[in-house]
Every structure is written in C-alpha cells, then in structure tokens.
Amino acid sequence: MTPHVCIVVLNWNDRDETLTCLEALRGLDYASCEVVVVDNGSADDSVATIRDRHPEVTVLEAGANLGFTGGNNLGLRWALERGADYGLLLNNDTDLTPDFLTRTVAAAESDPRIAIASPLILYHTRRDTIWSAGGHIDWRRGTAAMMGLNEEDRGQFGSTPYDVDFVTGCALLIKADVMRQLGLLDDRFFVYYEDTEWCVRVRRAGYRAVVAPQARIWHKITPEAREASPRVHYLMTRNRLLFLRVTRAGPMAWLYTLLADYGRTLLSWSLRPRWRSKRLQRRAMIRAILDAGRGRWGAYTEMAWG
C-alpha cells in the first residue's frame, strides 16, 4: 500500500508565495497525500484567499507567530491525528518537480532504518547550483554546514540515497512512527538549528537520515539578505549554543564556538574599520550570547538594533 503523506506548509504574511507553492503541489504525481497550511498569525488576507483558491487544502490558524518549530509542530500533530504515515515539512518558497515526492518517499521506504529523507535542493535563481545536498556536523568545532553548497550540480552525489548528519527543514520527510517515538521539533529553537537537532536525535536513536539525489526542488533563498539580517544573526548565534547544549557537545566544541568563532568575530567587527557596517549584527550577536547564558530561548521578540 502506498504510504500516506501529509505535507505541512507554513505561511506567515506570505500569501502569494504560498499560493504559488500550493499550485505546484497540485501537479504532484504522488496520489496518497494531503496538504495542510499552518498560518502563523498572518496580518494579510492569507487565510481567506488560500481557502477560497484551494478548497482541497486544510488551513490551520495558529493565531500567533509560533515560529518554524511551533507552526510546523501544529501541522505535524494534525498529521499524526489523521493517521498519516509520513509528515513532510515543505517551505512555501520552493519550486518542485511532479515526481520529487515519489522519489523521496521511495528513498525512505528503501530501508526500515531510514527515518528522515530529503530531496537535493538547488537555488531557484541558479537552477543548476546546489544549496543543500544534506548536512555535515563537525563535533570538534560545533559547526553544522551544508554539503555541496554553491557547487554546480554535475551529478556528483550519485543516484542512490546516501546518509547525512542532517537535512534542512526546507524539505524534510519523516516517518510518523519515529515522531511518535522521539517527539517533534524542539520549540526552544523557534527557528534555525531545530532541524539539525531533530536529525541528531533521530540518528542517535539508531535511524538513518538520507538525501535522495534523484529528487529535486528549488529554494527561493537569498543568502545575501540573510547575512545582512540582525534577526538571523541573533537566532543563529543563540540557537547554535542551544544546539550544543541539547546535544551534549564536548568541551572542544564549546571552546571553539565561544572563543575561536564568536570571540574572534566580535573582536574583528569591533576593532577593524572595514567592519563598521556590521554594527547591528555585532549588537545582535552580543545579545544572543547573553540570552543564551540566561537560558532565554523560544520566541523571537523584535528588537531595536540601531
């Protein structure tokens, strides 16, 4: 019997992007699936418009911005209640091929030890350039990095599923039984590093996380905008420390992160004239380290960085 997949798409004041994604999902060649959109308290007319144009889609209203973790967890709980065999987290800013889900599910079904699977993810604006071919964790340095980042897709990752340390929540397929056993995303992260920690939790329980390189999607991500955002710097800085804590990383990872990485970066941004433009990011980074030390996790509160 074909496994039933519940696709969870998160929306937050991004009506048009979500509508485009839902239109693409209508073209999937995988019959046994349903889509649930979780609206994270949008202030626009997202909910009404999505329900009007896509009556086949279930819309859950969170009523507030629960972040990537809380919003997706709401959708995953709904999927579990519906008896789905798999949950698929899918960013609304993705473009996809009709067979990407068929290929990803086939990879997950190829071995009962596989709990998580992901397609190969490329840039939307550079269709032949890889954004993520899975991820690798350097436990000595406490870093998590995308494999294949910015490489031209030449078929270098082969045609069969391969193991990775983690996959990105941009497109993450996970077995329902594993969610029931190990839990959902950790809400303390809110957004960033939550997918990495989830994969570590799953792998430490004896399961595999794989990438299905024959399955492909394209992500409308803009690395430059993320690099310039104090909000992203805050969350990435804080959540990396939470990741080290939750995964019980060793002392070398903590020393490298706090001294060689964060310390050196802050010193450079403070003393070198060429990095005066990083003033807001520096303040965000300092605030993140302080909040991590105080155990302040969870929802992000808008801050005045100027």
Image (spheres, helix red, strand yellow):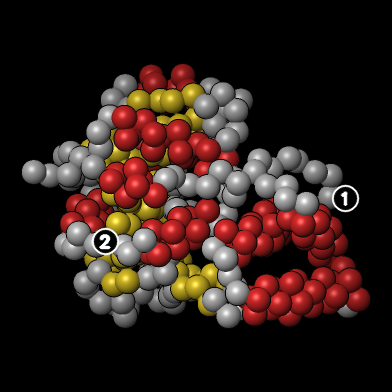
207 lies left or right of 43: left
The residue at 45%/38% (across/down) is: 73
Q: Residue at x 28, y 29 (%)?
A: 82
Q: Quadrant of residue 31?
A: top left
Please tell me whether mark 2 sits on a helix, a strand or a loop: strand
Considering depth in this image, is 3 or 215 the residue closer to the camera? 3
Q: Is residue 56 above or below residue 170?
A: above
The N terminus lies in which quarter of the figure? top left
Q: Does 297 sit left or right of 144 as displayed? A: right
Q: Residue furthest left?
A: 1
Image coords of residue 210 (percent x, y): 31, 65
Q: Is residue 187 above or below residue 157?
A: above
Horizontal and vertical percent for residue 133?
A: 39, 69
Give x and y (percent) for residue 271: 91, 76
Q: Quadrant of residue 218?
A: bottom left
10 Å crowding of disc 2: few (<14), some (14-19), many (20+): many
**Foreground pick, 270 / 196:** 196
* Residue 141 image point, x, y percent: 61, 78
Mark 1–mark 2 contact, CB under 8 Å? no
Q: Looking at the image, which residue is at 20% across and 59% down?
A: 112
Asked which secondary structure carries label 1, the reply is: loop
Would you call the spot at circle 1 few (<14 residues within 10 Å), some (14-19), or many (20 or more)?
few
Q: Is residue 159 left or right of residue 87?
A: left
Identify residue type, mark 1.
Gly
Query: Label 1 to label 2, Cα distance in Å?
Result: 46 Å
| Amino acid type at image mark 2 | Ile
Q: In front: mark 1 or mark 2? A: 2
Note whether 53 is above or below 156 in the view shown: above
Name the residue beneath numbered marker 1. Answer: 306
Comparing 234 with 293, the one in front is 293
Identify the residue under disc 2: 114
